[in-house]
């Protein structure tokens, strides 16, 4: 369970967000520049909020009142960047193993499980430059999960992919979340992605959560927004 | 008559200088990019100063600093019973100071050229700053660092002004190729001077050519 309640002054507006992420996929949805990535960076410890708190289970990542700001390496939060940020000077296997602190039998088993689940058994010795967009996404996902995170942050994870890969990987993301059973916090400005992947969708506008969808937003039977709901942002 | 001692000494001085320059350049560039210290702009200018000041001025300042009566010179004599003026160490010091800005600038540019997201990715995967530096920053900066090293080596090889001020021209002890060329020319021994010119040109050309070849013949040093 992740609890975020932070404020941070940005150049055009003040980010002010409060939400709780259970062990599900939470989607932060909003137009470009509304502060979505800033939220992820604050959770990961790459940015420091101005005030508030970020707590994961019993671990306080950040608290302005207790003056706590844990560095990223102590948070155990994996972050899948928009362009995947795979290390170009390492092969696929070295990338995936980067976050493993001590190699062990368990780590080996996890590695085998991940490359099988993500269908990348044939890639370990390939260099990153030889991978397609979809393969990079799978390797980045394997690397993120190999670190055995408490939370997985995903910044526009499917935006760099073609339509076919996007469709396939949406399902895989959902499946992986169910297996790992940790909070996945996913950022997107794509209505289809938000709809397809999110267990819950938080709508962001200029750094604020829009808690009550305007009447113009159409919700489907599951309480999720339909495509027309998202026209509000455009 | 060409003596090989100046050639050997030049290569020795340049090699040792490059070791110092490598550590100092990488350390300074890393500190400067990762901290926000007051007076950073002034420090940045200070680091570049040896590149724009005449080498003889650098030599003069070093002489004041490490000479027998200089603050560093006094300390070295008092605590280590040593003096570096007119020794090969002085030639190394001169070479290190004049070539430092080249290494610093190359390293700084190489560090700035790295995609910061890669370093952030390493941090979120649990890496300490030390590990991020050695496993991501340094390997990705390597081409820029090698350029800096090669330029520094070549610059030290050709160093004259600062070297003659603090290391002097003691044949067989502190005489490097540029000094040998100057004094051979002054003695009207143009054949010896010419031979040294050919030797230093061949060495310098070879390392720059080697570097360009290593970089896939795509990058030319300016």
Image: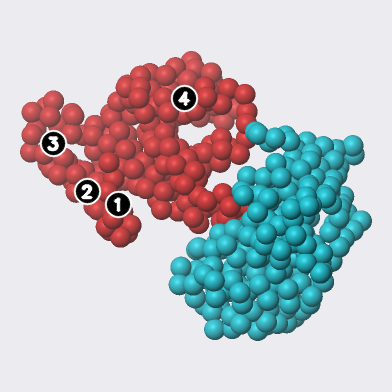
Chain colours: A cyan, B red
Q: Quadrant of residue A111?
A: bottom right
Q: Which residue is mark 2?
A: B205
Q: Earlier in the sequence, mark 4 or mark 2?
A: 4
Give the foreground label among 4 and 3.
4
Q: Is residue B140 left or right of residue A155?
A: left
Where in the figure is residue B90, as x and y percent of width and height? 40, 31
Q: Earlier in the sequence, mark 1 or mark 4?
A: 4
Give the foreground label among 2 and 3.
2
Does any portion of residue A226 appear in the rendered image?
yes
Q: Earlier in the sequence, mark 3 or mark 1?
A: 3
Where in the figure is residue A162, as x and y percent of width and height? 52, 70
Q: Residues within 10 Å of mark 4 (few under 14, many from 20)?
A: few
Residue B45 image label: 4
Residue B122 image label: none
Q: Is residue A189 left or right of residue B95?
A: right
Q: Secondary structure at mark 4?
A: helix
User: Alpha-carbon distance for marks 4 and 3?
Assistant: 36 Å
Q: Which residue is mark 1?
A: B219
Tag 2 and tag 3 share a subunit: yes
């Amino acid at each position: 369970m992740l609890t975020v309640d932070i404020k941070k002054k940005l150049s055009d507006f003040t980010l002010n967000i409060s939400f709780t992420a259970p062990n599900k996929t939470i989607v932060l949805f909003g137009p470009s520049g509304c502060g979505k990535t800033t939220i992820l960076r604050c959770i990961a410890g790459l940015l420091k909020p101005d005030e508030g708190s970020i707590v994961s289970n019993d671990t306080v990542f950040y608290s302005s009142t207790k003056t706590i700001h844990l560095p990223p390496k102590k948070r155990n939060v994996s972050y899948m960047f928009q362009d995947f940020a795979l290390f170009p000077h390492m092969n696929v296997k070295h990338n995936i193993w980067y976050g493993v602190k001590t190699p062990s039998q368990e780590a080996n088993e996890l590695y085998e499980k991940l490359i099988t689940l993500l269908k990348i058994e044939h890639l370990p010795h390939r260099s990153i430059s030889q991978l397609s967009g979809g393969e990079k996404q799978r390797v980045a996902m394997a690397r993120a999960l190999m670190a055995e995170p408490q939370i997985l942050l995903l910044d526009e994870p499917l935006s760099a992919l073609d339509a076919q890969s996007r469709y396939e990987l949406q399902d895989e993301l959902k499946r992986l979340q169910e297996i790992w059973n940790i909070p996945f916090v996913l950022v997107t400005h794509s209505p289809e992605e938000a709809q397809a992947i999110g267990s819950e969708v938080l709508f962001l506008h200029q750094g604020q959560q829009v808690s009550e969808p305007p009447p113009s937003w159409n919700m489907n039977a599951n309480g999720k927004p339909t495509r027309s709901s998202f026209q509000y942002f455009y | 008559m060409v003596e090989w001692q100046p050639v050997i000494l030049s290569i020795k001085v340049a090699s040792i200088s490059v070791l110092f320059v490598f550590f100092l350049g990488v350390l300074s560039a890393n500190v400067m990019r990762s901290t926000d210290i007051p007076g950073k702009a002034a420090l940045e200018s200070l680091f570049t100063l040896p590149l724009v000041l005449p080498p003889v001025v650098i030599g003069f300042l070093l002489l004041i600093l490490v000479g027998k009566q200089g603050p560093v010179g006094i300390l070295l004599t008092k605590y280590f019973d040593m003096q570096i003026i007119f020794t090969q160490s002085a030639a190394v010091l001169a070479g290190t100071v004049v070539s430092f800005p080249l290494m610093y600038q190359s390293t700084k540019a190489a560090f700035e050229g790295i995609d910061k997201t890669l370093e952030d990715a390493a941090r979120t995967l649990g890496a300490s700053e030390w590990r991020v530096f050695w496993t991501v920053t340094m390997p990705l900066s390597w081409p820029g660092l090698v350029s800096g090293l090669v330029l520094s080596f070549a610059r030290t090889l050709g160093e004259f002004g600062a070297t003659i001020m603090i290391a002097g021209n003691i044949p067989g002890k502190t005489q490097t190729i540029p000094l040998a060329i100057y004094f051979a020319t002054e003695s009207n021994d143009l054949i010896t001077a010419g031979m040294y010119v050919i030797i230093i040109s061949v060495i310098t050309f070879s390392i720059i050519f080697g570097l360009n070849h290593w970089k896939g013949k795509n990058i030319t040093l300016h």
